[in-house]
Image (cartoon, rainbow, N blue to C red):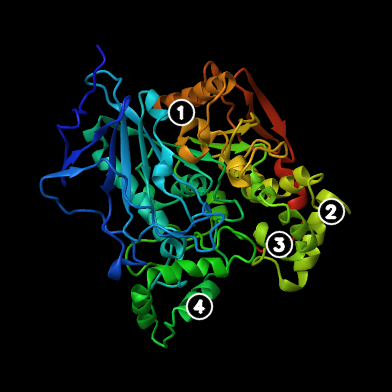
Amino acid sequence: MLICLCLLPTENPVKTPYGDLKGEDRGHYIAFEGIPYAEPPVGDLRFEPPVPFKSNWKGVRDASKAGSACLQWNHFLLEKDDKVYGDEDCLYLNIYTPKNYSIGQKIPVIVHIHGGAFMFGAGDIYGPKFVTTRPLIHVNLNYRLGPFGYLSSSDALIPGNMGMKDQATALKYIKDNIELFGGDSSKITITGFSAGGASVHLHYMSEWSTGLFNNGISHSGSSLDCWVMQHNTEEKFDFVVQRTKCQNDNRQKIVECLKKAPANDIVRLVGELQPYLYNPYNVFGVVPEPAAQNGKPFITDYPRNLLKAGKVQKLPWLITETKDEGLYPVAEFIRKPEYLPFIDANWDLVGPNLLHYNRTVPSDKMNEVSDMIRKHYLGDEPINEETYKRFCDISSNRLFHIGCDESVRIQGKYMPVYMYYYTYKLSFGIAELFAGKRDELLGVSHGDDVLLAVSVDPAAHDMPEGELKMQAALLDLYENYAKTSVPKLGKFTLVRSEAEDVLKYTEIAGPDDISIKTNDNFGDHQFWETLPFDEP
C-alpha cells in the first residue's frame, strides 16, 4: 500500500526546528511554500552575506503561499517601461513532496535554481507538477538579483556574490532539514536553467557549497559562458554610488548610504545600463572576491582558472544545450517588425551589447570585432527574416555553446561529466513566450528541454503525444540521475564526455532518436577564439 512517509495531511503540520509548517494538499503532491532560509536582507543586511534563519515562530506557520520574488528589473515585463518587480524581503524556498511513495522510504531531492541572467526571475516560476509525478522531492528557491545580489565594490566592503551565497545558504537549509519532509539528505541533485545552470556549475567551485549536494545538472548555462562574470565592476559600483548621491571620501560611509537608499531607485538603474531592449542582459554578475570582511569569499578566482587547476568538487556533472540557445534573447527581436531593421542598421551599437563584449574589447577595436562577426556569419547580407537563423547562430555560439564546450573539455578529466545536445522542437517554448507568437523562424529554444521537466505556467500548453513521450524520457533521466548519479533515458546511458580534442556528447532528437555524436568545432569555437576578448 502506497502512503506518505512523514507528510501528514495539511491539518497536521510538519515540525521543524523553527516551528510547525502547515502545507497544502495539491493532488499528487503537498506544497510547503514561503519557508524562510535566511533573515530578510534589508536595512543593515542589504549587500551583506546572508544570515541563516534562526528565529522561531509561534504557533503554526501557513506554508501555502510562496514568498515574494526578489527585487528586480524584470525582463518578462516586456511591454512596460518600468520593470520594477518584487521585494527585498525575499529569501524563501519552497518544498514539494509527492504522495505516492512507500512508508519508511527516503526519496531523492531535486533542487532547482532559477534562471534570469542573475537579474530577474523567481523560484516558484519553475514548478513541481512534473517532477513530483516521480518519487522525487522538488525544491525551488529565491536569491538576491541584480545590484542587490551582485553589486561589488571590488574590496572587502561589498565583495559581491550575495546571490550566490544566498543559494548556498538555501542548500545548507535543505541539507539540514529535508529529511523532515521525507527527503534523503544524501541524495541531493542541484539543477538550474540558464543563470541557474551557471550557478550549479559555480557551486562545484565554492567552499560555501562543499558537501551540500551530490550531483548537478546545468541546463543551458556554464560558468564559462561570456555573460556570467561581471566586467568593469568598479565602474558600475561608482555609477550606482553617483546616481544614489552616496559619494564620500570615506568608503564605509558610502556603504552606509547605499544601505539607506530607496531600493526601487537602485533597481531602476539597471535599465540605464541596457541601451537596447534588455541588452546586455547580465549587467551585474559573479565576481572573484578579495578576502571578505564579513564571511568567506564565494570564489576567489575566475572559473576558468579554477577549472584548469582542478579546484572543483569531484562530483558527477551533467550539462545540457539546445540547438538554438540564442533564441534567448533574439526571439524578442521578431516581436515587433521594426526590431530587425534597427539591429541591421545599428549593428555596431547592438552587437557588442547583445553579445556581451561591450566591456571586454578595447574601444578602438570594437567596430572591427563587430564587423568580423557579422562577416563570418552573414557575409554582406542584411539582418532580416531571411538571415534570422544565422543571426541566431551568432547568439547561440557566443552566449552558450562555446562556454559549454570549453567547460566539458576541461572538467571531463577530473570527474564524470556528461553532456546532451537537445534538438527536439516543442510546439510552444521559451522563444514563443518572448516572441509573443508562434513563428516558423523559432527553433529549439533555450529552455525547451527544461519546460518538460519543471512546469512553467507562462509557457504551459496542451502537449501532444510526442511531447508527453519526450517528457517521460527526461523525467526518467532526472529520476535515474538523482538515485544513482548515472544519467539514463530508459535503457540509454548518456556517454561520458572525457577531455578530448573532439567533444563527445549525446544528441536527443526525440524520445526514440538518441545517439552519440562527436564534434571538433562545437559552437564554432575555432572562430571565436581568434577574437581579442579580454575575458579571463
Q: Looking at numbered disc 2 in the image, what kind of residue is underneath it?
A: Pro
The residue sitting at the top extreme is 1
- Which label was assigned to residue 171? none
Query: Marks 3 and 4, how far apart in space?
Result: 24 Å
- Which label was assigned to residue 238? 4
In the image, taking residue 467 as reference, residue 390 lies left or right, namely right
Viewer-nearest of discs 3 and 4 = 3
Residue 38 x, y percent position in the rendering: 28, 54
The residue labelled by disc 3 is 350
Element assignment for label 4: helix
The residue labelled by disc 2 is 382
Q: Looking at numbered disc 4 in the image, what kind of residue is underneath it?
A: Asp
Q: Are marks 1 and 3 in contact (CB under 8 Å)?
A: no
Element assignment for label 2: loop
Viewer-nearest of discs 1 and 2 = 2
Compare marks 3 and 2 and give the one earlier in the sequence.
Answer: 3
Image point (41%, 54%), residue name: 164
Q: Looking at numbered disc 1 in the image, what kind of residue is underneath it?
A: Tyr
In the image, taking residue 76 as reference, residue 8 lies left or right, namely left
Query: Marks 1 and 4, how far apart in space?
Result: 44 Å
The residue labelled by disc 1 is 478
Q: Quadrant of residue 504?
A: top right
Compare marks 3 and 4 and give the one earlier in the sequence.
Answer: 4
Residue 402 x, y percent position in the rendering: 66, 46
In the image, taking residue 145 as reference, residue 498 lies left or right, namely right
